Amino acid sequence: LGQRYLGGALGLALCSTVASVARAMDAEPDFRSMCEDRDPELFVVLPRVIWLAFLRAPAEHAALICDVLPTAFATTGAEGAVPGVDLQAFVDKARQLRLRVGDAETDAVLLRRAVSGNPTGDYRLGPDAREDVRRFALELEGWSVASQRHCPNDWNSCVAVILRVLAGLRAPERATLRSPC
């Protein structure tokens, strides 16, 4: 299983994704608890967090997303994974939301929403921005489910590797997680 993720674009994407998940754990204590306790809700929340990482830096995470949902990509090859029309439109919506609301605020609100499943923290946004975030979160959920359902074995393998790497990063003397990559 690990052999598949060692090296190449997929290995680099895995490292970027693990680092992003670790940062999300630091930012959201409830998510950290889910990960540490292997709470069943983790397996609903983790795909959302992975997708948020991809949307924040598509080039860094594309190989991993392409591995679990290849139908979302137009081409893969030497130039990397090129998002298909629908996925590119979703990436563009994420960029537009960041421009409208602000990078840090968008990331914080979407992460809170991904973890809690409700609009916790959206109160700081105006009504139009709250509605944009709500619509975006619904679309995020669709992509999250699609990545899990396309090939459940591939998805489960990917999650198993991510969780194993995260567990290996934990050391008793450290309060935060750091990527090994």
Image: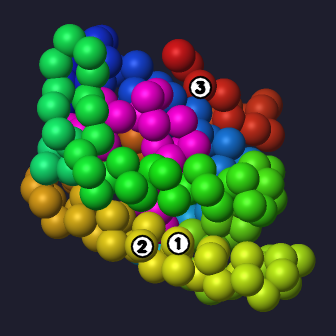
Determine whether label 1 and label 3 are within 8 Å by CB: no
Label 3, on which residue? 179
Determine whether label 1 and label 2 are within 8 Å by CB: yes
Rate crowding at label 2 as few (under 14), some (14 to 19) or many (20 or more) other CA atoms within 10 Å.
few
Does the magenta-highlighted stretch encompass residue 51?
yes
- The magenta stretch spans which residues? 42-67
Q: Amino acid at mark 2?
A: Glu
Q: Residue 143 sits in which quadrant?
A: bottom left
Is tag 1's residue or tag 3's residue first in the polypeptide sequence?
A: 1
Does the magenta-highlighted stretch encompass residue 48?
yes
- The quadrant in which the N terminus is found is top left
Give coordinates of residue 27: x percent, y percent: 76, 53
Q: Which mark is residue 139?
A: 2
Above/below status of 59 relative to 9: below
Q: Residue at x 53, y 16 (%)?
A: 181
Give coordinates of residue 90: x percent, y percent: 42, 58
Label 1, on which residue? 136
Give coordinates of residue 82: x percent, y percent: 27, 33
Residue 32 visible in the shown view: no
Disc nearest the viewer among 1 and 3:
1
